[in-house]
Structures are given as structure tokens and as C-alpha cells.
Amino acid sequence: MSDIIGEPGRADAVTPAEGAAGAIRARNEAHILTAAEGVFAAHGYRGGSLQAIADAAELPRSNLLYYFGSKRGLYVALLERTMARWNALLDEITVEDDPATVLTRFIHAKLALVRRHPQASRLFASEILQGAPLLQAYLRGPLREWVDTRAAIFERWRSEGRLDVRVEPRALIFLIWSATQHYADYEAQVLALTGREQLSDADDRRIADFLCHMILSGCGLQTPGT
Amino acid sequence: MSDIIGEPGRADAVTPAEGAAGAIRARNEAHILTAAEGVFAAHGYRGGSLQAIADAAELPRSNLLYYFGSKRGLYVALLERTMARWNALLDEITVEDDPATVLTRFIHAKLALVRRHPQASRLFASEILQGAPLLQAYLRGPLREWVDTRAAIFERWRSEGRLDVRVEPRALIFLIWSATQHYADYEAQVLALTGREQLSDADDRRIADFLCHMILSGCGLQTPGT
DNA sequence: GCATTTCCTGAACAATTGGTCAGGAAATTG
DNA sequence: CAATTTCCTGACCAATTGTTCAGGAAATGC
């Protein structure tokens, strides 16, 4: 019920230096979080059991409780870590920037992030599927603010004729998100339908180029020279 | 493990006429499946409990077992019903058709489907998030065939200059799927970010228009007159 | 070295899980 | 009507769930 995640002042404890006090804690917590990420991403919060996470982390179940207090505590810590990483990538743009360049960079960054941390993307997806009980504050707070800022800039660009009038700023952001996250969340489907074992770097590049082309031309923009 | 779903010959029992033998079964099964859809969509297969479904259906837990034998049996039946409905919408197209019209219709149909059955879309998403253990046969069989057919047609269009050369047929299909399903799977996020309680018909129309514009212009096509 | 904090875990906890089954009610059939 | 099939469920089962806790090992501080 307490949707605390994403509110300000939640700075993660600074990772203690190697050998210093609390170093063991930092190492083990990270280890457990990684295991939890895989389990919760695949089976959701309710479906993921502490035992399964403990097995993946090769630790006794009680050890997870020792560090995180409860299942919910572990899940919250995991979401916080994920959103913190996410936020680190929400780069700044201004009205002065070139729309085509901004969008291209945005798509590439998001695609790279999602392809590098597919588990994190799936975890996020499963939380949203539940109705985002713990992420309401994050969605309605910092993330919404971020979206509003970008949307305002897109709006400006549009009124200045630098973006096609038919572009809905927020819908554009959703489109980029959905198109990129699809390759993490629906990876199993993509692989099954393309007959691949996994996506190659070449695949990643073709996907990125295709998405950039589609989005840019929908915005009435030319692909900027590399 | 047995990924049977989606293979041919799985015709659902024809719903018996009102009052005929098995009518009770048909009615109750449908009732239970609807309840199960909501629970599994939100919490996944492992996370969804028979008790929760029973509560939603206002039936004793044993009754679900009576009709479906096991939790897995219920889940499989639910996935089968979902995929059957899905398949009913995979309409036919030919090379002779007009690309712009086909794509427009495709987007509208998919968006309407997904907005009308958001639970089904989320159920599907959660199954894929797990790695699609039960849908492998469906994905690699009938769905892949469907995708290959469309992709071949897009390819033809492209070689005839009726589609931009930069369009990757399969990636185009994925783009349409992801962009539309986003409004079901990530509904909680969309609502939180737009500050809405729910999406209106007007929202639906604006979304559809925007997506059609983006996709069509990325394909080098004009929006067809209505 | 000793004292203190941190780390760790096996055993036990009540609650919930999916599943079985006997026994009976309700409906359909002849 | 009686016979038969379908429908239904409460009680019980073993297994698993998240959590508590006592007691001790390991690391750290001095």
C-alpha cells in the first residue's frame, strides 16, 4: 500500500569501500538483488518465492530475510535500485537542441538500456501489469514531471514548425518506450517468431535504424548524418 | 512443459444451446475463466491463486477443480480461449490490397481488440514475460506462419516500390503490436502519466490517428481518405 | 589479546498453497 | 416415475509460503 518508491531523499547507501565495514553487506545485498530481479521479472511479486530467489543466489532463505527484513522489503529495495538506474538515464534536453538528434539519441539510449537490462525492464513491466501498486508515487511524481518537461519541448518544436503537427507529444514518448521495451518484455515472442536463439548486435543495429527511421519520418524529420 | 496450445485440432467445444445438457458447465466455465483472466493477468500464473479466482467467481475452490481438474488445466484452458479469440482477428490480406488501407485497418483492429480486452492482453504479456513456457507451440507454429505470410507480402510491396525500402517487415509488425498493446499492458502507467482516470473514446481516436500517421508516413504512405 | 558489532542459519511457526475424495444434491434422461 | 448422469462441496492432505528467533560464527574495533 505504501507507495514510497521514487519520492525524493531516497538516496541509496553509498557502497562502502572494499574491505571496509559493511562491505559484506553491500556485496551480498547486490548478489541477492540480482537473483531477485530474475525471479520477480519472470513470475511477478506474488509468484516469485523467497526460496526460488535463495536458490538462485545460493544462500539460505533466512539470509535474504536477514538483509531485507521481508519479501516486500526485498521487492521494494529491488524496485528502488531499478528506478535509480533508470533515472540516471533521463538526460536533459532543451528547446534549442535539434529534434532529429534528440530523438535519435533518445531511441538509441532507451534501446541500449533495455537490451542491456532486460530483466529490469521485465520487472518494471510486471509491476505495471499489477496496476503499479508500489510505483504510483514514482509514476505520478518524478516520472510524470520528466514526461511533462519533454512534452512541453515537443510542443514548442511543433508550434515552431520543427515537428509535424500531427505528433502528439505524450503519445510519441509512449511509442518510443513501447517499441523499444518490446524487445525486452516480449523477447520470447520475438525470438520464437524470428527463429533466432538470441538477438545479435547486427539485429540490434537494424532494429535501432528501423525505429529511428519510422519515428523521425513520422515527425517529419530527416535522419541526421552520423 | 507440454506446450500444446495453438496446435491444430484444438477446436473448443461448441457452446451447447440454452437449456441443453452441459449448459450449466458452459456457463460456469465461462464465468470461472473470466475470473481467472483477471487474476492471472495481474499476478501471473504462479502468483494467481485458485482461492483468489474462486473469490472473484463467488464459487468454492473445489468447484474450479471440478471443472478444470487442476490449476494448470484452468490456465491452459484460459490461454486457449484467449488465443482462439486472437486468431479470429488475424484477417487475410493479399498483395493486390492497398498497403495504406491494410495498415490502417490493421492498426485500428488491433487497438480496438486490445482496448476491448485489456485483461487478455495482459494475460498474454505475463505468459511471455515468463518465457512463454506454454505458448512456444503457438508462437513457433500458427503465429509464426501468420507473421511470415504478412512479412512476405510487405516484402513484395517493398520490392514494387509501394513501401519504403527502409521498412523491415517483421519489425513493422512488432512495432504495431507493441505500440497498440502498450495501451493495455501499461495502462496503469499511461493513466498515471496523463493524469486520467481512464481513457475516453476521444483519447482512443487520437491515439489511433497518431499511430496511423506515424506508421504510414514511416512506410512512405499517405493516410487514405475515410 | 578482548569486546562488540555484524553476520549467519537451522529449526520451528501459522497460514496458505494446489489437490483428493467421499458423499450427496440437482438435473437430465428414459 | 426411477435411473443415470452431471453437478457440487466440505473436510482433509502434504507441501510450500513468509516470518520469527535463539544461538553461535565471523569480522571488526580497540
Image (cartoon, coloured by chain):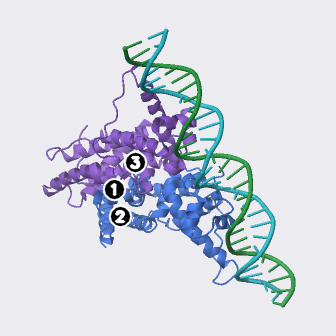
Chain colours: A purple, B blue, C cyan, D green
Which residue is nearer to you in this view: B123 or B164? B123
Q: Please report, as a chain letter, where disc 2 is located.
A: B
Q: Which residue is mark 2?
A: B100
Q: Position of residue D10 (x, y in %)?
A: 69, 67
Which residue is nearer to you in this view: B90 or A123? A123
Tell me which amino acid carries mark 3.
Answer: Gln
Q: Which residue is mark 1?
A: B219
Q: Please report the residue visible at 35 percent of the width from the left and 43 percent of the height from the top.
A: A83
Q: Position of residue A75 (x, y in %)?
A: 45, 44
Tell me which amino acid carries mark 2.
Answer: Ala
Q: Quadrant of the N terminus of chain A?
A: bottom left
Q: CA distance from mark 2 to mark 1?
A: 9 Å
Check whether the beta carbons of the residues at disc 2 and disc 1 lie within 8 A of each other: yes
Asked whether residue A116 is in view, the answer is yes
Name the front one of labels 3 and 1.
Answer: 3
Disc with the residue nearer the chain's start (2 vs 1): 2
Q: Are marks 3 and 1 on the same chain?
A: no
Residue A14 sits above or below residue B22 on the image: above
Check whether the beta carbons of the residues at disc 2 and disc 3 lie within 8 A of each other: no
